[in-house]
């Protein structure tokens, strides 16, 4: 049994930690560990990964939690292994074996199924998922042996690539890479592909390699985070506006920045734009201080999500401290 964790003094922390989630833990468990290591007051993740899945899990701290929906809505990329000939109760290696079937397929069969599952498809969410019905997660019904009717949902498989075929191996398998829209269940994709191949399948491995513009190469592990000094942990954080990649930038002067930050619309010569990152002047450099997101219509700048004045000040101070640390290291 784990020893009781020492109480820590919480503090405001703002930014995005790109975590390489390890196998075995839930998304919430690793979030709480990272939150404890950073002594952060407020944190949230951007979509769950199964305990048997590893990979990219952006964690949002402080003001960044206001923009977490952007990552929830982002396309995701995964690498997975489909174990052929065996179906399980959870569609992955954690479940009970339901059926074993012979595997008598060829590369051409796999290529045809890849084409079948590329593009817009429909999926029935698995019972072993965090999707809720009547306020209760489906996996809770599943653990109680209750099957709940689920409506199919439309998702898009943008790309489906076969990385390796092991059809003649003692344990036949296919390695795939999938880029898909939000809400796609890779376990269900693997299960459905196995049925289309006529032999059944379940996932024996799953790793998220990208979410939105964030990739596994940018991530830090929990083990690395634990081994760092506190200042180095803070330095691992991406700024809040890392979540606003691709947003057009608007910079306001001090007077307009203050009014915008209070929720007032501003008039200007901005073209119509659905996604804007809005900045005000910052005392410590030319980059400006993020105020929030907005959209513009008919020359009017309309706030979408706003930081509080306190959050703006704290973000500027945190950025300044990180910049000073970096200059000392260099």
Image: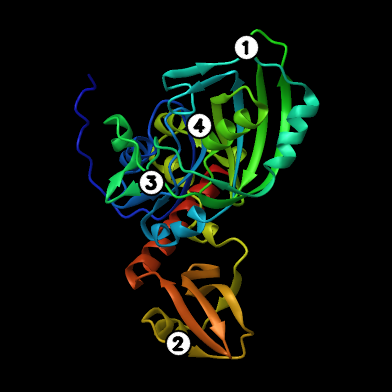
Residue carrying label 4: 54
Residue carrying label 1: 171
Location of residue 286 by image quarter: bottom right
Residue at (62%, 83%) from the top-left corner? Answer: 272
Q: Position of residue 107 (x, y in %)?
A: 78, 24
Q: CA distance from mark 3 to mark 2?
A: 37 Å
Q: Mark 1 and mark 3 in contact? Answer it, CB < 8 Å.
A: no
Residue at (36%, 65%) from the top-left corner? Answer: 311
Residue found farthest to the right: 108
Q: Which label is found at residue 131?
A: 3
Judge by depth and name the residue closer to the eye, 206 or 31.
Answer: 206
Q: CA distance from mark 1 to mark 4?
A: 22 Å
Residue carrying label 2: 265
152 horizontally vs 139: left or right: right
Q: Which label is found at residue 39?
A: none
At label 1, counting other C-alpha atoms closer than 10 Å, the crowd grade (few under 14, some 14-19, many 20 or more) is few
Q: Earlier in the sequence, mark 2 or mark 1?
A: 1
């Amino acid at each position: 049994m784990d020893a009781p964790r020492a109480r820590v003094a919480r503090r405001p922390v703002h930014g995005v930690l790109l975590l390489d989630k390890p196998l075995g833990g839930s998304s919430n468990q690793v979030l709480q560990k990272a939150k404890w290591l950073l002594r952060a007051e407020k944190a949230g993740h951007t979509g769950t990964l199964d305990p048997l899945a590893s990979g990219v899990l952006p964690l949002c701290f402080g003001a960044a939690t206001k923009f977490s929906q952007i990552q929830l809505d982002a396309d995701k990329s995964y690498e997975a292994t489909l174990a052929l000939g065996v179906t399980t109760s959870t569609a992955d290696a954690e479940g009970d074996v339901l059926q074993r079937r012979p595997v008598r397929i060829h590369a051409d069969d796999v290529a045809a199924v890849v084409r079948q599952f590329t593009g817009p498809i429909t999926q029935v969410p698995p019972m072993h998922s965090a999707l809720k019905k009547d306020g209760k997660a489906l996996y809770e019904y599943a653990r109680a042996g209750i099957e709940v009717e689920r409506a199919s949902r439309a998702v898009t498989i943008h790309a489906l690539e076969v990385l390796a075929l092991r059809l003649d191996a003692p344990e036949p398998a296919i390695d795939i890479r999938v880029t898909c829209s939000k809400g796609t269940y890779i376990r269900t994709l693997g299960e459905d592909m196995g049925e289309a191949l006529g032999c059944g399948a379940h996932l024996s491995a799953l790793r998220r390699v990208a979410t939105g513009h964030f990739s596994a190469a940018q991530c830090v592990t929990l083990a690395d985070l634990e081994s760092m000094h506190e200042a180095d942990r803070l330095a691992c954080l991406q700024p809040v506006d890392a979540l606003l990649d691709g947003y057009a930038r608007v910079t306001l002067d001090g007077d307009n920045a203050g009014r915008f930050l209070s929720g007032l619309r501003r008039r200007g010569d901005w073209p119509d734009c659905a996604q804007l990152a809005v900045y005000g002047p910052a005392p410590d450099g030319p980059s400006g201080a993020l105020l929030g997101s907005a959209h513009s219509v008919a020359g009017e700048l309309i706030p979408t999500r706003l930081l509080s004045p306190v959050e703006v000040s704290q973000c500027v101070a945190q950025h300044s401290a990180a910049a000073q640390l970096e200059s000392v290291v260099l």
